[in-house]
Image: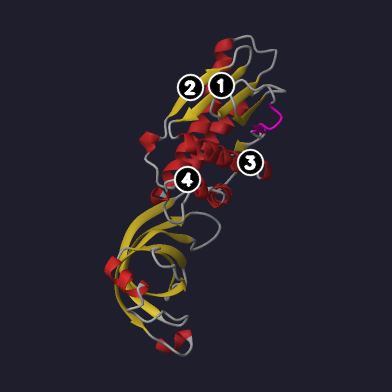
Amino acid sequence: MEKAIAIRFDFSKERNDPAVILELLSGYVKVYQDISELTGTVIGFDKKNLDFNLVSLENGSALIWISCKIKELNEAFFNSATILADSLETNPEVSDADDINDHAEKLSEGLDVKSYKDTSKIKIDPWIDPMLLGQIFQSISALNDRLLDGEAASIGFGYPGEKDFSTFKTINKNFKVNGNVVDMLSKVSRGESYRGKFYVNILANKGVNVWRLEDVFNNKKFSAKILDTEWLDSYQSGETDPIGPNDIIDAQISCDVVVLNGKRKDKFEVKNAKVNKVFSILRNKGRQDDLF
């Protein structure tokens, strides 16, 4: 028997309508599936491959076991949901864009990309969309509003039929969203392509095409895939002299520029960057600003 994901709803004895109990359980199952879909797609998996199958429905309790069709993702998805549950304990209220962005950053930083076997699917610098995460938060908040005293939902990872729930992670029943996330967030995500100059902060080893770059003009640091394979092969084979700490590459890149609304002004991130063409290396043996 393979491990699966458990969603449990501990309901009050005052609940007399089984349809309502199953409705609330289904609501938390939907929340878990939405979290898994969000984290799965941002690291590069196709949404249509992230469906879940019903493994079992426990008799005598509101407990359901489900499993992703890509079984290797089950534990990683559970870890993501656990990170989010911990984050909801730390910050149990969402009132503005910064609250959502903070939760999104924690979830993004905690993504366990190393657990995926097919690393070719993994995106560079996975980014959690705050708007989609905010909509999940609204679902959790709406479910929590319907809970009676003593009720709670929790998630676990183990073998169907287990009766030890001590390791289950409880979803904060006091978490709430104050307002509408659509009103809180103003997100602009645009694709850009431009020729620029970049410092190379981290060089990749031979055979690896992901480098860490820094834009000379705005000091924004980001990871990028080098798609100019002819130039990369030449560089990694030693035909081109190594790039020094003060050298600059003149290159054409494409990327997504994400700007988020919030109290922090001029906040933007460069995501999914690709170096499409390297034109030249500008050599500089002096300080970094000697070329300008």
Residue sitting nearer the eye, 64 or 89: 64
Query: Is 254 a magenta residue?
Result: no
Q: Secondary structure at mark 1?
A: strand
Q: Quadrant of the C terminus?
A: bottom left
Q: Tag 2 or tag 3, which sits nearer the N-term?
A: 2
Q: Spatial distance from mark 2 to mark 1, Cα to Cα?
A: 8 Å
Residue 182 lies, in percent from the top left, at 46, 42
Left or right: residue 164 compared with residue 76: right
Q: Residue at x 65, y 42 (%)?
A: 86
Residue 67 against residue 113 in the figure, above or below: above
Instruction: Name the disc covering residue 116, or none.
Output: 4
**Magenta range:** 165-170
Please name the residue that numbered disc 2 is placed on. 54
Residue 243 lies, in percent from the top left, at 41, 79
Please name the residue that numbered disc 1 is placed on. 64
Task: Give the number of the mark in front: 4 or 1.
Answer: 4
Q: Secondary structure at mark 2?
A: strand
The residue positioned farthest toward the top in the image shown: 16
Please name the residue that numbered disc 3 is placed on. 88
> At label 4, which amino acid type do we have?
Tyr
**SS majority, magenta:** loop
